[in-house]
Image: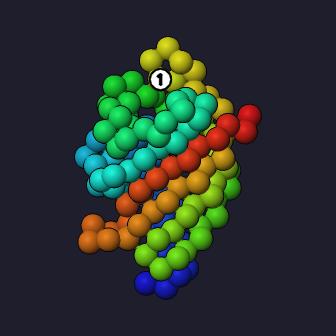
């Protein structure tokens, strides 16, 4: 694939990831989220969430009502990519309002299963 094709695929996968989260499509999330995935959001917890914790939240009540990628830049480094995005959502987890505007840094790696997300860092902008 060319760099332009990789960038287009990663933009599509980034949106697919959040669409799967919104739909609670656990099969698709299992495909997209790599073993060893880590989620860092200081506004939620001081330590990174493991893949198991993140998938548990996806299964057990993290609800995305709507979301939008307002801007997305994809940097490629061979079989690794870093996506810097401005992202907004209307969402909640159980009784906690998680609606806001965020700056995301997502790391994707291409392996035998194709592109998978291996890490996300989320910071509140709003």
Asked if residue 5 can be seen in this view, the reply is no
Assess disc 1: are there few (<14), some (14-19) or many (≥20) residues with their C-alpha within 10 Å of its C-alpha: some
Q: Residue furthest bottom?
A: 2
Residue at the image point whose x is 51% and y is 68% from the top? 81
Circle 1 is placed at which residue position?
93
| x, y percent for residue 115 | 38, 66
Q: Is residue 117 left or right of residue 65?
A: left
Total marks placed: 1
Taking the view exactly as shown, the residue that stands out farthest to the front is 47
Q: Could you say where residue 50 lies in the image, as x and y percent from the top left?
A: 37, 41
- Residue for point 57% across, 21% down: 97
Residue at 54% x, 32% y: name it: 46
Q: Quadrant of the C terminus?
A: top right
Under circle 1, the secondary element is strand
- Can residue 119 be seen at all in this image of the molecule? yes
Q: Residue at x 49, y 65 (%)?
A: 10
In the depicted structure, whether residue 114 falls above or below residue 69: below
**Residue at the far top in the pictured view:** 95
Q: x, y (%) of residue 37?
A: 38, 50
**Vertical comparison of 10 with 52: above or below:** below
Q: Quadrant of residue 72?
A: bottom right
Q: Position of residue 60 (x, y in %)?
A: 34, 25
Residue nearest the observer in this picture, 14 or 124: 124
Specify the quadrant that holds the N terminus. Answer: bottom left
Q: Is residue 47 left or right of residue 83?
A: left
Is residue 11 depicted above or below 101 in this figure?
below
Instruction: Say which of 46 and 91 sits in front.
Output: 46
- In the image, 50 versus 86, the foreground residue is 50
Colour scheme in the image?
rainbow
């Amino acid at each position: 694939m060319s760099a332009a094709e990789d960038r287009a695929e990663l933009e599509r996968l980034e949106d697919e990831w959040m669409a799967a989260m919104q739909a609670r499509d656990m099969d698709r999330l299992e495909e997209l989220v790599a073993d060893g995935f880590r989620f860092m959001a200081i506004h939620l917890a001081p330590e990174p969430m493991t893949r198991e914790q993140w998938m548990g939240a996806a299964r057990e009540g993290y609800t995305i009502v709507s979301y939008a990628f307002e801007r997305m830049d994809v940097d490629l480094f061979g079989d690794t990519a870093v996506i810097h995005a401005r992202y907004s959502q209307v969402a909640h987890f159980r009784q906690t309002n998680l609606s806001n505007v965020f700056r995301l840094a997502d790391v994707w790696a291409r392996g035998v299963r194709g592109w998978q997300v291996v890490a996300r860092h989320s910071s509140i902008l709003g």
